[in-house]
Amino acid sequence: MNATITPDRKSILANIRIQRFTPGEHKSAFYDNFKVNVETGMTVLEVLRLIKNTQDSSLTFRAFCRSKICGSCSVRVNGKPLLACSTQLMPILDDFKQESVIIQPMRNMPVLRDLVVDIDPVIEKLAKMHPYIMENRGRIPETLEQESLMSRQELTKFDYITDCILCGSCYSACSAASADPNYAGPLTLGKAYRFSADVRDSFKGERMQAAVDQGLWSCAQCRKCINVCPKDTRPAISIQRLRKMSIDDGIHDTPGSRRAKAYTDDVAKYGQVNKPMLPVIVNGPKGWAAIEAADNYLIKHGIEPTHQVCTLDGQSSTQKIYAKVKELESRGENKT
Amino acid sequence: MLTYDILIIGSGGAGLYAALESRSEEELRVGVLTKIYPTRSHTGAAQGGVNAALANLDSTDTWQDHWFDTVKGSDYLADQDAAEIMTREAPMVVREMEHWGCPFSRTDEGKIAQRPFGGASKPRACYSADKVGHVMLHTLYEQGIRHGVNFLNEWQVLSLMHDGTRCQGVTAINTQTGRVHTINAKAVILATGGHGRIYWTRTSNAFGNTGDGTAMAYRAGLPIKDMEFIQFHPTGLRRTGILMSEGARGEGAYLLNGLGERFMSRYAPDKMELGPRDLVSRSCETEVREGRGGPEGEVFLDMTHLGKERILEKLPQIRELCIEFEGVDPIEEPVPIKPTAHYSMGGIHTDINGQTEIEGIYAAGEAGCVSVHGANRLGGNSLLDILVFGKRAGKHALEYARGASFTPVSTEQEERDTQMINTMMDGKGSGITIADIRHAMGNLMAEKVGVYRNASDLESAISKLADLQEQFKQMRIQDKTKAFNTELVSALELKNMLDLAEVVTAGALERKESRGAHTREDHLERDDKNWLAHTMATQGADGRPKLEFSPVTITEFEPKARTY
Ligand SMILES: Cc1cc2nc3c(=O)[nH]c(=O)nc-3n(C[C@H](O)[C@H](O)[C@H](O)COP(=O)(O)OP(=O)(O)OC[C@H]3O[C@@H](n4cnc5c(N)ncnc54)[C@H](O)[C@@H]3O)c2cc1C
Ligand code: SF4
Ligand code: SF4
Ligand code: FES
C-alpha cells in the first residue's frame, strides 16, 4: 500500500462494423464501418454510445439500465447474441486476434431500425402462455393478514428461472424458432415451467396445454439457449422438465408425448427403440401412410422393409441402465 | 383522438401497481403508457430489499418502529402522517406481492426472509437474493398480463394538459412511428420515476431516469417539492456510476486515494470504511477536491488484500460487476470509484392519495413526493413507497374516474409539441450536440450541486445552466428519420433534465442549512427554526422557478438530533 495507484489501461484503434437498416428508407441491410479508440474497461454499449455521440447520431439501438438487469440491449457481436452493456470489448478483440468486430441485430425477430428488433411477437407468445400465478387456495391465504408458506426446496425448483430479464438472446439463437415461426421460444417455455413448478399455482393444466400447442415438443434440445443466456436461466433444462411434467401429469395425447412414451416403453421392453413403428405410435392410423411411403421407397431401392424390432447384443445392459434411471427418478428430481 | 378513463404514465413498480389497482370489472378503459417495455423499468435495478415490519426475523419489530426509523432517517422532513400510512400498510402490500407469486427468499419456516439495512433498528428488509426489484417488477407485469392491462410501449409523453382545475390528458409521441398524439383522459397518474440523470454519468440510475413526468408537471404549473434533496451513494464505478454495494466494505475492502492512503482514517477513525453513506460520500469527494484523487478524479475500492479465495467465496457478484462493467478484476487491482447520485427524494407534490392540486392528476413513486422520505430516504423504503402510494393513487383515480366526465381538449398542445419537434429537426444548427450539453450538465451538477454545496458554487451553477438552456435552443437533431429516432428521444429528455437541474440548484441555494442529503459547506448545521419546511417550486411567468415553503406535518415525533 501507499504507492501511487496507476491503473494499466490500454487502447486499440478498432474497426467497428455495424449492420444498418431503416425499413422504408433502405432496400436492404448494409454495413457501416466506424473507427473507434477502444480502451480497457469499455463495454460494447459504451462503444455504440460513443459512435452515436461523436460520429453518427442516427445509429439506433436500445439500452436503458446499462447494468445487465433490464434486458434492452441484446445485439449480436461476431454472431453471438449478448448484452451490449455487460460485455467488455477489449477481450473480444484479443480473442479474435483482430482489430475488428461486427455488430448485428438479434435474429428471428423483424428489424425495426439498425440494431433494434420488434419484440412484440415474442411478448405475444409469452402472454399466451399464462405467465402468472393463479392462486392455489390450498397454499395462498385469502387474507392479506397472512403470507403463504413456501420452503426453500420448493422455491429452488423454479427460482433460477426468475432471473430471466426477457432480453431475447435465447430467442435469437434458438434453432426451433428459426425453423418454425410459431414456436414459442426458450424464454416463454422457461416461464411456463417456472409457474407450473410453483406450489402456489393452480393453473398447470391450462398452461401445459398452451405449452404443448406452442411447440413444447418442437425444441431440438440443441442447448444454444443455455449457451447464450446472460442470466444462466437454462431454458432447455426447463423445457425438459416441463416435458416430463406433462407426461407425469398424463397429458399423453400429443404427438410429442406419445413419441416420448413410445421411446421409453420400447427401451424398457426391447432395450432399444422400435423406429419403424414410430409414425403409427405417434400419429395414430395416419402414420401408416408415412410407413407405406417409406416401404415403397425401400422396395424401389431393392431393400426389404421390416416392421420388426431388431434386437442387439447387450440389450439387457440398456434395460439395466433404464431401470436404474427410473429408480433415481422416483427418489426425486435432479437438482442443478 | 385516443381516450382513456385512466391513463398511467410509467410502468415501473408504481405505475404497474396503480394499473392493477385501477383495473376494474366495469367499463373503464385503463391504459399504461411507457417509454420503454414495462419490464425494462428502473424498478428492476433495486437489489437490496423492501421494508415491512413483518417481524419474521425479529419478533419484536412493529410498524411503529419502522415509522420512527423512517422519520428519523428523513432528518425530520418527512410528513409523519404519510410515513405512518406507508409503514402501517407495508405488511399488506408486501404480502399481496407474495400472493401474486413474487419469489421472495425464505426463512427456515418458509416465511418471507428479511435482512438488516442501513438506518433500520430491526432487520425488516424483505429480499429475494439480490434481485428484489427485478422480481417485484416482473410479478406486477405478469399480473398485468393476467388481468389484460392495456400497454402502450415505447411511447414518450411530452406534455400534461388541464383546464386549470381538471385533468384533460397528455400529448405523447409514438417512438416507433414518430407521430405526436393527443390523449384525452379523465385521470392521469404520473409514475415516471426519478431524475438522477441530471448528474448524467455520475449516477446509478438508468439512462431514462430523466424526470420527464416531474418536468412536465412543473411546466403545467404544478408545484414540485423538496427537489434539492438528492441521495448520493459513495461507491459507484468510475466509468458508469453503476453501484457497488456496501457488501464489499462489509467484507473488509479499503477505500484508498490516489496516493494509496486509507483516507477514511481522517474522517471516521473508528468506523473507517463503514461510516454512514453521506459521510463516506463526502470524504471521497474531499480527497478528490484536495488533489489526492486518481488520474481521473476517482478514488479506489481495494479488495486485493482480502485474497482470491475470500473474494471468490464472499463477493462473486461484486467481482463480476467490476470485470464486466469496468474491466478490472478486484483480485488483481483496486477498483476505481466515485460517489454517484442514487435517489431523488423530491418530486411532484401530492397528498396521501397521490392527488395533486388539479383534479384527476396524480403522481406516485419516485416521481412523486408525498413526502415520506424527507431529506434522506432509507434503503428499502423506496420500493415500499411505490407499492403503497402506487396502490393508493390507483384506487383513488378509479373512484374519481367512475364519477367524473371527460374534460374536452383541443389539439392545440399537440400542434405546439409537433412544432417544437419540427424546429429541433430543422436545419443544421450550431454544431453543438445533445451529448455535449448533457455532458456539461452532468459535470456541472456533480461539481457544484453534488455532495457538497455552497452559495458561490450554486450561483455559478445557476448561470451556467442558463447558458446550457441557450445552447439547447441552438441544438439541432441530425437524424432526420421519423421512425425510432432515439436522438429525438434524448433531446426531449434533455429538455426535461435542464428544467429540473435548475429547480434542484435553486432549492439548494435557497436552503441555508444542512439536512439529510443536502450539505451546505457554508451552513453546516440543521436549522429547525427556519428550515423545517418543504420547498415548493412552481414555474414563474419568466420561466424561472419560484420558491415557497410549506410546513412539515409532525404528529408523533418531535425533531431530535439525528445520530446513529
Ligand atoms: C441501483 C439502484 C438500486 C436500488 N435499490 C433499492 C432497494 O434495494 N430498495 C429500495 O427500496 N429502493 C431501491 N432503489 C430505488 C428504487 O428502485 C426506485 O426508487 C423505484 O424503483 C422507483 O420506481 P418507480 O415506479 O417510481 O419508477 P421507475 O421504475 O423508474 O419507472 C419509471 C417509468 O416511467 C416511464 N417513463 C418515464 N418517463 C416517461 C415518459 N416521458 N413517457 C412515458 N413513460 C415514461 C419509464 O418508462 C418507466 O416505466 C434503487 C435504485 C437504484 C438506482
Ligand atoms: S434447446 Fe430448444 S429452446 Fe433451446 S435453443 Fe435449442 S431448440 Fe431452442
Ligand atoms: S432466458 Fe436468458 S437469454 Fe432468454 S430472455 Fe431470459 S435472460 Fe434472456
Ligand atoms: S441496458 Fe439493461 S440489460 Fe443492458
Image (cartoon, helix red, strand yellow):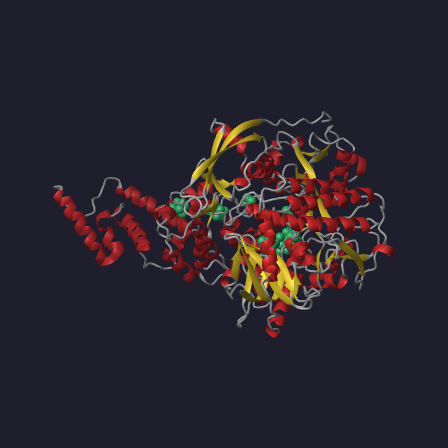
User: Is residue B47 visible to the viewer in this orientation of the structure?
Assistant: no
**Figure quadrant of residue A3:** top right
Q: Residue B33, image x and y in percent?
A: 56, 58
Residue placed farthest to the bottom in the image? B403
At a point 61% along the width and 70% down the height, the residue shown is B407
Between residue B407 and residue B76, name the one nearer to us: B407
Residue placed farthest to the right in the image? B529
Q: Measured along the vertical axis of the image, is residue A86 above or below residue B168?
A: above
**Figure quadrant of residue A50:** top right
Q: Measured along the vertical axis of the image, is residue A285 above or below residue B426?
A: below
The total of numbered circles placed on residues is 0
Q: In the image, is A230 to the left or to the right of B414?
A: left
Residue placed farthest to the front in the image? B427
Q: Residue B150, image x and y in percent?
A: 51, 62
Q: In the image, is A301 to the left or to the right of A243?
A: left
Q: Residue A17, image x and y in percent?
A: 47, 34
User: Is residue B238 visible to the viewer in this orientation of the structure?
Assistant: yes
Between residue B1 and residue B122, name the one nearer to us: B1
Q: Residue B352, image x and y in percent?
A: 70, 65
At a point 27% along the width and 54% down the height, the residue shown is A282
Between residue B112 and residue A132, name the one nearer to us: A132
Between residue B16 and residue B28, name the one nearer to us: B28
Q: In the image, is A148 to the left or to the right of B225?
A: left
Q: In the image, is A101 to the left or to the right of B432?
A: left
